[in-house]
Image (cartoon, grey):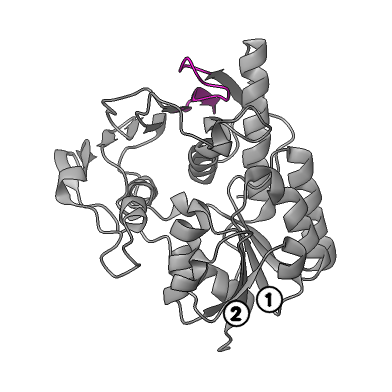
Amino acid sequence: MNKTIQVGIAGFGIASKVFHAPFLKVSPHYEVVAVLERHREESKALFPNAQIVRSFEELLQTNADLIVIGTPNETHYPYAKQCLLAGKAVVVDKPFTIRSTEAMELAALSKQTGTLLTVYQNRRYVADYRTIQQILQQQLLGEVHTFEGNYFRYRAEAKPNAWREKPEPGSGILYDLGPHLIDQCLCLFGIPKFITADVRLQRPHAKADDAFTVVLDYGFLQATLRAGMLVREHGPHYIIHGTKGSFIKYGDDPQEAKLKAGEMPSETLGIESEEFYGLLHTEINGAIVKEYVPSQQGNFGLFYEYLYQTIANGAPLKTTPWQAYNTIKLIELAFESSKKRCTLPVEGLMDAY
């Protein structure tokens, strides 16, 4: 079915401007008809014909079939709920919600109303993760026993007026970067048995968490997920060890940096340079192999390509509300584990993979 999806974008901050709008702009399957900007009209540069609205209620009154929510975290639940009740399909930027009870309610409401609801987990479509998927699917490492995923940055100073750094529900680095690492781990390995976490405020001025270590225990496999704002020399992005070999990957997918610099999606946007190819050291057919593996091409736009196939042709939804619920539930358990300084059993998650 050839159908153009009419889109309304809620908010035009960094999330919408960098991660959603460019891909909606270049896709032939979507037309942005309205954008919620409370005070400015920055979206006119990309969408000159779109209506500018000043309230979310006004956005719901437009002819948009799909609402993309790129507003601050605490608005995700109420805005998504209003969309579902209004019969509007919804894309929620990560994190899905602040509380797992909210995520569960939205997932149930989506099923009850028959209205599509999904979450923008764009880190499923980056060069490193797609390459790791390929290596694990080919069983090149044997049975994996160690997985490490790291998102390190260096910014010692406070970021003025940044809502993510305020002492409010849903702020902090665990809600910001945790959904990426946790979602990747759940997709690769499924639901863990236990969780142990250490969530910290490392910088003197910090009012919200700015570092975390989350350990997911699968039995034979242990997955360690880290992020922090005081790491000048980042080290490997991913480290994976199995019974047959290892895979070590430096560098980050190039898409985000290019998009922030103003580059539009293209056939070359997600191509990673050779200097960041991952090192594979393993045994294949009885021979020891130590070589750099060309990275799979990253493409955030795949999210919207797959979504179109779901809306227009009934293909299975790639990122389901229950998968997103699991991520929020694990974030809650991580905070609880850190507060209690203990290991917790992972309970209450859904079999959604």
**In the picture shown, does residue 266 fall above or below 96?**
below
Residues tagged 1 and 2 counted as in contact (Cβ below 8 A): yes
Which residues fall within the magenta stretch?
201-226
Q: Is residue 235 visible?
A: yes
Q: Secondary structure at mark 1?
A: loop
Q: Is residue 314 visible?
A: no
Mark 2 = which residue? 5
Give me the residue at 47% from left, 16% from top: 202
Identify the residue at the far front of this view: 39
Give the camera-side residue of 135 and 312: 312
Image quarter of residue 231: top left
**In the picture shown, does residue 317 fall above or below 222?**
below
How packed mark 2 is, by other alpha carbons closer than 10 Å (few <14, some 14-19, many 20 or more), is some
Q: Quadrant of the N terminus?
A: bottom right
Q: Secondary structure at mark 2?
A: strand
Mark number for residue 65?
Answer: 1
> Picture coordinates of residue 235 (x, y %)?
27, 28
Q: Amino acid at mark 1?
A: Asp
> Picture coordinates of residue 246 (x, y %)?
27, 33
> Picture coordinates of residue 44 (x, y %)?
49, 72
